[in-house]
Every structure is written in structure tokens, then in C-alpha cells.
Image (spheres, helix red, strand yellow):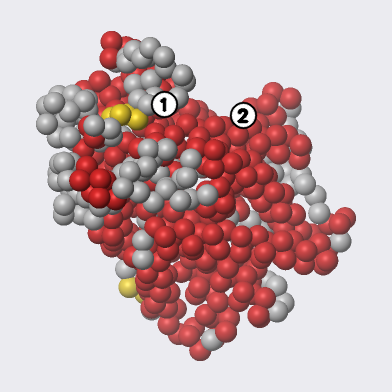
């Protein structure tokens, strides 16, 4: 069980027997398998960073008109903010051994937690389909390169996707579902391989680029514009904010994975190596590749699939693209499959298991026809911006409640108590104070997203949401602040009755 409070399985099963079936199943109950080491956490972040999206984002920062040292500074500051936030959000879930959706019951109430759970699930819902489509598109390139006879299958289309596109999408959809269906141990083993595998391909691609262009063809500054001092400062602040925003989704539900951590020291070590060190190294390798494409092909290529497809050797192209596909599957599973699995299961534990919750997201992603969504930049921009406006406020309320209101104390039994005697029952299972802090914070975020004159501020919506929701909730719930017990030695208490 969490921390050093080890108890026998029989005792744990007996304790779980007293949990309300409306709030608990085997997937949501406190885990007894807290065996993830720092390397498993490190691999989790590698799977998040080493994706097609991460590649494009890292490369784009070097086109802002900043010097290379300024970009690297922004990346370092932004990723260190992510690291600090990851350590903060990891602690309650690691202590209690429960996923994000369950730990939210402490702030929102045992039933009110369905609000943040569904919001996070819907965000993953959309992104899951888009990432699956990107992986399917890469698979289609590999297929056409080795089997040109498949080209006629790309002519006709149904619901916006060609016949070959449907086949590749189905293959990727099934492959991800297969890994997910085997549970968290299979996911852990998969991401332990997927993240490092991309580094092998990325480094090999960078070596090939340098071999073709020479070191003179590589520049760490990819910008084609000059900025004033004030403009440079603003771009640096914006770039820092974008780094945090990019990781805001998996950061919010990091508790889904930290619950399996051996202890917080292992998690902090994994975050340290998986975020600042890993992200900066990945960014430098990315820039070497992107900069080299400008010298080698006459224009900058920020799509890693296109870059790999231009390598002369067919075998190298196949290996590179398949590795990119593997990386995309990795980030899709950890960021967009596991989260809705727990989130939707939290809504009806006895009817929706971890597997069922994940499959709901998988099936729903097909119904969204994500290729059409992805081909409409304006639609996807507003859809994800609206959903993203919720992430900051949810994050702020969760941390404010745990660290400032509850003072680091958790009553694990009460997380599964659906009676008025439960500590997290509040009012009918909902905490009106948390909801009251969430609503105005989200409305302000939405106003920023839909107001053209505030477009530049939209990049900071996560920070604004965190500050507004945390400040509002801290004031509304000030009378609920828990007193520090006498003799409290700075260690967070987990109350189990």
C-alpha cells in the first residue's frame, strides 16, 4: 500500500469491501502494486516528449527570431516549471495509490469529481483520434513506398478517408487497443522501449544530416527575422508558456501513473531525468535535423515523417517511420488512453471498468472522424482551446485543496464513502466551493480564447486559469482549512480507518 504502510492482501481486500460500489472497482481502488522505479517515470516522459507533435513544437521555438541560447533558456525554464508541477500533482496520488479522477474527490466531492474527470476524458478523446490518424498516415507512407500497387486504394474516399487510410487507421487503432487491453504492466513495458527507440532513430538521422551537409550546414538559430529587445523578451516569455501548455494535458492526470511509484524520491528522480535533461537533449537533436533539412533540401522541413521519407535507403526509411509510429502509439496510450480509461470508469465504477473506459474513448475517436477535424485548423484550434481552458483551473483547484486547504492530509477511506458521514461528501457528494471557483475561472479562459484582441494572451491561459482558480478557491474555502496536528513533522498524513 502507499508509503510504508504495508498491509496484507487479505487486509486490503477486507478494507476495500467497505468501499461504496458506486465509487470503487478494482481499477480505482488503492493499488497494492507500487513498483514503478525512476526509469519507468523517465520512460513515461520520454513517450510524451518523443512524438511527432513534440518534434514540431521543439523545432518551432527556434524559428521565433531568438538566439539559440535564448531558446534553450526558455525551454529549460518552461520544462522546469513542468517538473515542479509534476512533483506537486504526483504526491497525493502516490500517497493514496489512486488515479487522478479519484484524488479529485477530495476537492470536488465524491460525485463532483466526475466534473474534472469527464473534462479531462473529453480532451483525451479528441487528441486520441488525432494522434491515431497521424500514426496511420505514417504507416500509409511506409505501405505506399514498399507496395506502390496499393496506390489505387488512395483514390476513393469514404467519410473523408481513403480506403488505404481506413485500413491503416484500423491497424493503428487495433495495435494501440491491444497494448492497452493487457493492462498497466503491458503499458509500462511498452513505454520503456518506445521512448528510447526514438532516440536511436533521431540520433541516427542527425548523424546522417551532418554527414550530408557538414557542420557548416547546421545552425542552432533557424529564425529568418530580426527582433527588438522588447520583442525578444515577449517571445521568450511566450515560448516558456507554450512549453508548459504543451505538457498541461498529461501533467494534469500524471497521478494516473505516479500512483504506481515506489516512493516520491523515485518519482522526483524520474521527473528530473525525463523532463529537463531529456527535453533539452531532444530539442537540440531536433534542431540539428531541422536546420540540416534547410541546407540539404533548400527549405525547412518540420515534419519528421517527411524528413525520414527522404532518406535514400528504403530499409532506413521503413525503420525510421515504424519507430516514429511506435513513439506516437506510446504518447497516445499514456496521454490519451489511460486518462479516459480511469476518468470514465470513475463515472460508473460498477458498469465501466478501466478497459471499458479506454474503449469508450477509442470508439468515440473513430466517430469523431479525426482526420476531418485535423484538416480544419480553425475548428481544431477552437475545439481544443475551449477544452484546454479547463485544464489550468482544474489543476489550480486540485493543488490548492491538497496543499493549502487539506494541508497534505488524505482520508483514503473517505474517498470511497458515499454517505453524509464521509469527509468528502460536502453537499450531496458535490463541493459547491470548488465548483464555484471553477466556473468563473473557466469562463474567463473561454473569453480569452474567443476574443481576437486577446489572442496573444491566450498562450498564457493555463497560468491564468491556475492562478484564478487557486486564488478564488483559497478565499472561498478559507474556513475549511485543516489545522496542523501537534507534533506534525512536515510529512503528509494518509488517514485510513
Mark 2 lies on residue: 237
x then y, percent, for residue 129: 38, 59
Q: Residue at x 52, y 80 (%)?
A: 143
- Considering depth in this image, is 145 or 175 the residue closer to the camera? 175
Which quarter of the figure has residue 23? top left
Which element is circle 2 on? helix
Q: Residue at x 50, y 30 (%)?
A: 460
Q: Residue furthest bottom?
A: 149
- Considering depth in this image, is 61 or 400 the residue closer to the camera? 400
Q: Is residue 50 above or below residue 258?
A: below
x then y, percent, for residue 373: 38, 56
Disc on res. 492: 1
Label 1 vs 2, first from the N-terminus: 2
| Quadrant of the rendering where the C terminus is positioned | top left
- Considering depth in this image, is 160 or 217 the residue closer to the camera? 217
Query: In the picture provided, is 128 more to the left or to the right than 352?
Result: right
Which element is circle 1 on? loop
Query: In the picture provided, is 354 more to the left or to the right than 68?
Result: left
Query: In the picture provided, is 406 more to the left or to the right than 261?
Result: left
Q: Is residue 52 above or below residue 494?
A: below
Amino acid at each position: 500500500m502507499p508509503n510504508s504502510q504495508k498491509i496484507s492482501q487479505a487486509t486490503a481486500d477486507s478494507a476495500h469491501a467497505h468501499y461504496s460500489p458506486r465509487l470503487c472497482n478494482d481499477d480505482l481502488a488503492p493499488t497494492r502494486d507500487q513498483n514503478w522505479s525512476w526509469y519507468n517515470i523517465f520512460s513515461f516522459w520520454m513517450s510524451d516528449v518523443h512524438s511527432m507533435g513534440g518534434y514540431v513544437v521543439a523545432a518551432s521555438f527556434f524559428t521565433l527570431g531568438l538566439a539559440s541560447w535564448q531558446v534553450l533558456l526558455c525551454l529549460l525554464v518552461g520544462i522546469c516549471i513542468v517538473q515542479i508541477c509534476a512533483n506537486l500533482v504526483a504526491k497525493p496520488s502516490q500517497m493514496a495509490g489512486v488515479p487522478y479522477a479519484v484524488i479529485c474527490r477530495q476537492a470536488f466531492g465524491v460525485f463532483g469529481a466526475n466534473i474534472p474527470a469527464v473534462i479531462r476524458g473529453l480532451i483525451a478523446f479528441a487528441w486520441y483520434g488525432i494522434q491515431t490518424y497521424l500514426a496511420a498516415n505514417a504507416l500509409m507512407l511506409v505501405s505506399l513506398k514498399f507496395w506502390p500497387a496499393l496506390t489505387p486504394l488512395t483514390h476513393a474516399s469514404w467519410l473523408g478517408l481513403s480506403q488505404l487510410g481506413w485500413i491503416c487507421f484500423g491497424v493503428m487503432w487495433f495495435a494501440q487497443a491491444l497494448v492497452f487491453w493487457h493492462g498497466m504492466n503491458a503499458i509500462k513495458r511498452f513505454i520503456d522501449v518506445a521512448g528510447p527507440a526514438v532516440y536511436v532513430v533521431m540520433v541516427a538521422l542527425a548523424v546522417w544530416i551532418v554527414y550530408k551537409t557538414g557542420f557548416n550546414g547546421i545552425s542552432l538559430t533557424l529564425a529568418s527575422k530580426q527582433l527588438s529587445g522588447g520583442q525578444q523578451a515577449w517571445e521568450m516569455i511566450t515560448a516558456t508558456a507554450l512549453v508548459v501548455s504543451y505538457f498541461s494535458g498529461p501533467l494534469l492526470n500524471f497521478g494516473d501513473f505516479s500512483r504506481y511509484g515506489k516512493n516520491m524520491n523515485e518519482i522526483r528522480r524520474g521527473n528530473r531525468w525525463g523532463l529537463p535533461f531529456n527535453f533539452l537533449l531532444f530539442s537540440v537533436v531536433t534542431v540539428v535535423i531541422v536546420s540540416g533539412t534547410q541546407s540539404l533540401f533548400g527549405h525547412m522541413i518540420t515534419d519528421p515523417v517527411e524528413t525520414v521519407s527522404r532518406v535514400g535507403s528504403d530499409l532506413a526509411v521503413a525503420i525510421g517511420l515504424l519507430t516514429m509510429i511506435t513513439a506516437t502509439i506510446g504518447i497516445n496510450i499514456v496521454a490519451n488512453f489511460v486518462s479516459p480509461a480511469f476518468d470514465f470508469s470513475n463515472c460508473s465504477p460498477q458498469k465501466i471498468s478501466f478497459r471499458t473506459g479506454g474503449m469508450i474513448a477509442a470508439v468515440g475517436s473513430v466517430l469523431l472522424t479525426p482526420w476531418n477535424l485535423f484538416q480544419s485548423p480553425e475548428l481544431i484550434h477552437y475545439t481544443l482551446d475551449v477544452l484546454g481552458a479547463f485544464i489550468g483551473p482544474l489543476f489550480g483547484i486540485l493543488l490548492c485543496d491538497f496543499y493549502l486547504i487539506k494541508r497534505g492530509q488524505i482520508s483514503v477511506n473517505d474517498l470511497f464513502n458515499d454517505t453524509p458521514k464521509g469527509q468528502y461528501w460536502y453537499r450531496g457528494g458535490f463541493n459547491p466551493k470548488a465548483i464555484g471557483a471553477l466556473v468563473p475561472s473557466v469562463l474567463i479562459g473561454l473569453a480569452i480564447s474567443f476574443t481576437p484582441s486577446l489572442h496573444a494572451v491566450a498562450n498564457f491561459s493555463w497560468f491564468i486559469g491556475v492562478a484564478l482558480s487557486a486564488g478564488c478557491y483559497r478565499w472561498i474555502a478559507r474556513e475549511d482549512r485543516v489545522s496542523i496536528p501537534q507534533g506534525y513533522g512536515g510529512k503528509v498524513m494518509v488517514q485510513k480507518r
